[in-house]
Amino acid sequence: MSDVRARCAPEQFRLLWDQLAPIGRDADGGYLRYAWSDAERACRGWFEAQAATRGMVVTEDGNGNLFAWWDPPGGAATASAVVTGSHFDSVPHGGAYDGPLGIVCAFLAVDLLRERGVAPARPVVVAAFVEEEGGRFGLPCLGSRLLTGALDPAQAARLTDADGRTLAQVTGGLPAGARPDLLARFGAFVELHIEQGKALVDLDAPVGVASAIWPHGRWRMDFAGEGNHAGTTAMADRRDPMLTFAYTVLAANKEARLHGCHATVGRVEASPNATNAVPARVSGWLDARAGDEATLSSLVEAVHKRAVERAGRDGTSVALTAESITGEVRFDTDLARRISETLGGAPVLPTGAGHDAGVLSGFLPTAMLFVRNPTGVSHSPAETASDADCAAGADALADVLTELTR
Ligand code: HGY
Ligand code: MN
Ligand code: MN
Ligand code: MN
């Protein structure tokens, strides 16, 4: 018997969540689930098992993205699909929720639709995108960029991980790249994600709807100087790129505050990385995000200018290379409003975090749901959400899928 009022109990969420929780977890409770690692493969195995349990057929798009199809009988199976899902991969030592929550809630939403006796007039697809964080190959949203043709497969194949292995070596060949045939079968995409801030706490709402994603990007900064002995090289004779780098990190922080936006240097490599040697080279990665594209460009230019000036004084050099730049994403306003109404007036808010939904929004009507994050912490083992809010997220997603598959 179907129950039109069926809701997801927090215990139901916990049951499914606990199956994924041990995969790729380190001793401190952080997660390392790089794309195509054993941990991510285990998550993909779990995905296939979940799909099989629900009688959903899994396809792979030749780029590493997985899709589990619930095809309703008859003509509805050929109607354009409503796709929902997220990613399994994590940043190094990341949190449990960023990505996997959207996939777990997607399967729970399918269960709710069935419990409620909803007969969708179009296929419902659960998606798992690959390498969303760019943790392994440096380019975020790699899977969705390949699928949509935003990234050239030959260029992707040459990307190299920290072990010096190319993507082609890791995956065993060239990715398929753009799949317009598949995109043509997708009518809408909805990604549920943990909020990576505290806006929903302040608004006292368990679930929100995304309006926009800030423009953002990653820049590699290569500083070069002269490697030398730490004990015998006079301070005045040094050409130390670490100094230039350190100054640039401070300048990035200051410029971000002046511009009213965000700049982070969270990754650094020094060479030869010896305690008793002045380094010869330092590379740092600048992550910058701003409310509009002009401010983002102005911020990065200002940081670059200050780094060059400082390099002149230190006798070093600096080269800045853009590794990825993502323009502003404005999610479909009508869809966001319709979803907010479906959810009884859920708040609509922007975010500074990137998502596959941002890439897909250039190709089909796309929306995002956020689940409240009590501390706002993300990309950290401390990232958390309550079971009740996650279950409320699954409920909301089921309501949205019901509305969109009518
Ligand atoms: O880095 C990001 O914005 C994201 O969480 N992928
Ligand atoms: Mn993330
Ligand atoms: Mn994410
Ligand atoms: Mn994402």
Image (cartoon, rainbow, N blue to C red):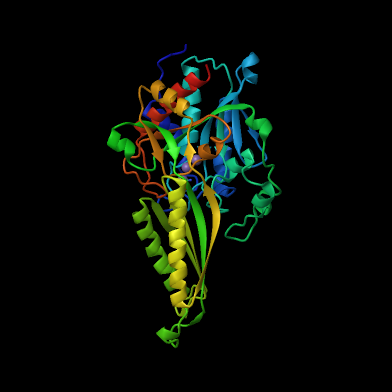
> How many numbered marks are there?
0
Residue 273's x, y, as percent? 49, 72
Outermost right residue: 173
**Residue 267 sits above or below residue 124 on the image:** below
**Residue 339 sits above or below residue 269 on the image:** above
**Residue 301 sits above or below residue 387 on the image:** below
| Any part of residue 134 in sight | no
Residue 199's x, y, as percent? 33, 38
Q: Is residue 382 left or right of residue 63?
A: left
Which residue is at 40% across, 60% downward? 252
Which residue is at 59% across, 30% downward? 68
* Between 3 and 265, the one nearer to me in the picture: 265
Q: Is residue 70 left or right of residue 276?
A: right
Which residue is at 29% across, 34% downward? 203
**Residue 206 sits above or below residue 251 on the image:** above
* Between 171 and 307, the one nearer to me in the picture: 307
Residue 104's x, y, as percent? 48, 33
Residue 14's x, y, as percent? 41, 33
Give the quarter of the image for residue 200: top left
| Any part of residue 89 in sight | yes
* Between 282 and 13, the one nearer to me in the picture: 282
